[in-house]
Image (cartoon, rainbow, N blue to C red):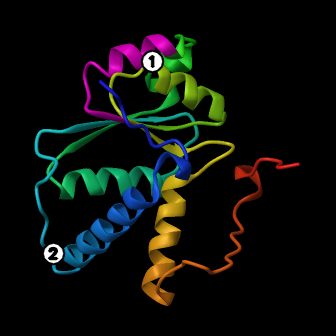
Amino acid sequence: MNIKHFLTLDSLNRKELEAIINRALELKAQTKRREFEATLNNRVLGMIFEKSSTRTRVSFETGMTQLGGHAIYLAPTGSQIGRGEPLKDTARVLSKMVDCIMLRTFEHEKLEEFSSYSDVPVINGLSDSFHPCQLLADLLTYIEARGSIENKNVVWLGDGNNRKKLY
């Protein structure tokens, strides 16, 4: 089975990206009307936070709940990762119990290693090199405010601690 992870924006091709943005626009309109489709009934998202974030946790938990699923929060001190368990062991065990895993970590290499041992899709909730969920949200906001981003030059500035030296 070929598992589709979302580790960087490059994990998506153009068609997939457009489909996700279009679906997000639909879901956002439904949310404004307080209409929620239970498309994730009986699905469980495991959320591993090595680096804490109020907004990331609440947005993932809220989304899972509104779509009929459930999210499980694992803090570094509340999981074996915080006690030195190898990533491959955690990935193998957790992926037998949940349908998807979101990992927010300090090192992108950990995310890549974790996903290589996971039997379920892994979502990058933030690493030192990439923040693809935030980029999707930014792209959605741009499209809502200005229309298509095609053939546009856009500059993104973010937290200094979320960047990686490119030269």
Query: According to the image, label 2 marks what residue?
Result: 34
14 lies above or below 73: below
Q: Earlier in the sequence, mark 1 or mark 2?
A: 2
Query: 163 or 112, which lies in front?
Result: 112
* Position of residue 19 in the picture relative to residue 85 (left or right): left
Residue 33, by quadrant, is: bottom left
Numbered tag placed on residue 30 in the rendering: none
Closer to the eye: label 1 or 2: 1
Query: Disc 1 to disc 2, how far (Cα)?
Result: 38 Å
Residue found farthest to the bottom: 146
Query: According to the image, label 1 marks what residue?
Result: 117
* Position of residue 106 in the picture relative to residue 164 (left or right): left
- Amino acid type indicated by mark 2: Arg
Secondary structure found at label 1? helix
The magenta span reads 88-101
Residue found farthest to the right: 167
Q: Residues within 10 Å of mark 2 (few under 14, many from 20)?
A: few
